Image (tube, grey):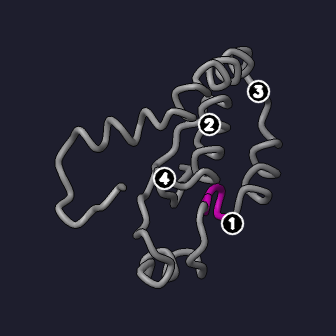
Amino acid sequence: MIELYQAEWCPFSAAVRERLTELGLDVVAHPVEPWPEQRTVLVERAGTDSIPVLLADGRQFVGTREIFAFLDTFESPPTAVEHRRRYHEHRPARERDVTGELLDRGAPLPELDTA
């Protein structure tokens, strides 16, 4: 089982999730608290408050460089190229912050000031 400690807003976590998708690897994603000093569970589990953290095969990989080095040991399936192509096709939506707009339409967070 592969576990990923990450946050959806973190671009480094997003890059790891994209690579996992390209490889077709199943993963259990654990959301972490917004601030490093709040991440006691992550510190207990992985000894760090940095994200992303990937746990796999009894080993731990911290940060995109370590995680990507591990993921590079897997053979890419034929669909990997198409996933990467689709990622690039959706760049305009990421640049326009479509996900942020969708989130703001959802349940309001009373103390959030997005101005």
**Mark 1 to mark 3: distance in Å?**
22 Å
Give whichever of 103, 115 is nearer the camera.
Answer: 115
Q: In the picture provided, is 98 more to the left or to the right than 27?
A: left
Q: Which mark is residue 18?
A: 2
Residue bearing the label numbered 3: 76
- The earlier-in-sequence mark between 1 and 2 is 2
Q: Identity of the amino acid at label 1?
A: Val
* Local SS, label 3: loop
Q: Identity of the amino acid at label 4?
A: Trp
| Main secondary structure along the magenta-highlighted residues | strand
- Bin the neighbour count of mark 2 within 10 Å (Cα to Cα): few under 14, some 14-19, many 20 and up: some
The residue lying at 76 percent from left, 27 percent from top is 76
Q: Quadrant of the C terminus?
A: bottom left
Q: Are marks 1 and 2 in contact (CB under 8 Å)?
A: no
Q: Which residues are magenta?
A: 53-61
Residue bearing the label numbered 4: 9
